[in-house]
Every structure is written in structure tokens, then in C-alpha cells.
Amino acid sequence: MTNTTNSHNIYNKGVLMIIILLIIVGFMIKLPRSFRNYDKELHALFYFYASFGCNLIWAKNKVARYMLGVLALIAFGVGIEMAQEASNHFFSKKNHGNFDLQDIKYNILGIGIYSSLFIANYIYLKKNIDF
């Protein structure tokens, strides 16, 4: 591995860590009032794009890696909900909502919608590749 490739990988990992940190902070603060009526839809939309990003950046259309990524996203969603609930007991001021199973349901809905596209694309590519 060349020095340029190594520094490029370190840069990519650094950018990814910053994005993940911003996502965690974003989920831990209250939504602006104008978005509060769309909370569930925003959960589905975020996890749809997170699934897409998981495939694009990490899994690269490999089913086993994608499924591992899906499990990690679901665990992340549950963990965020638990952290929101815990933060309400840790801080004197309520920072976010409570643990909400509906949020997890919409997280899984967003993942499921992208996963159906992933599976359809996988089947299409399998049928149309000549060996």
C-alpha cells in the first residue's frame, strides 16, 4: 500500500467518524418545531439513506456484508433510543424524547424499503450476468 493510499484511507475513516459523531449528536437533540410532526418519516428516511450508504461505502453489493450492516443499523437505532431515555435521567433538562418503539419501527421500515431495492438489484444482476 502506497503512502498516498494509506493517507486517503485515514482521511476516509476520519470523515466517516465525524459523520457518525454528527449523526449521534443529531439524534440526541430535540428536533426544531417545524420538523416535529414528521419525526417518524424522518426516521424512515434517515435509515433508508443509511442503508444505501452502508451498501455503497462498505458492503458494495455483497449480501453477507450488507446484512451485517443492516443488523448494525438496527442495533444503532435501538441504542440511540436507549441513550435518549437514559439522557433524560442523566441531565436535569430533557434533551430529547423517550424510548419510542414507533421510532424503531420506522427505522426498520426505512431499512426494509432500501433492502427490497437491494434484493431486487441483486436478483437483476444475478440473472443478467453471463458466466
Image: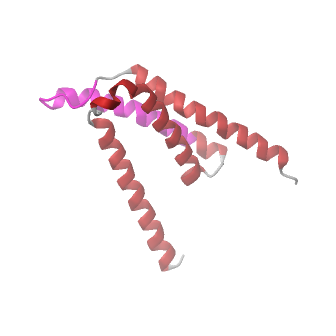
Q: Residue 117 lies in magenta, yes or no?
A: no
In the image: residue 5, left or right of residue 18: right
Q: Nearer the viewer, residue 65 or 102?
A: 102
In the image: residue 81, left or right of residue 93: right
Q: Quadrant of residue 78?
A: top left
From the image, give the main secondary structure of the stretch colored magenta. helix
Instruction: Please determine whether, in this image, residue 5 is positioned above or below residue 74.
Output: below
Q: Quadrant of residue 95?
A: top left
Label count reads 0
Q: Residue at x 72, y 37 (%)?
A: 120
Q: Quadrant of residue 79?
A: top left
| Residue 62 image position (x, y, % from top left) | 66, 48
Rendered-image quadrant of the C terminus: bottom right
In the image: residue 76, left or right of residue 90: right
Q: Nearer the viewer, residue 40 or 1?
A: 40
Q: Residue at x 36, y 44 (%)?
A: 23
Q: Residue at x 52, y 36 (%)?
A: 71
Segment colored magenta:
68-97
Q: Residue 70 lies in magenta, yes or no?
A: yes
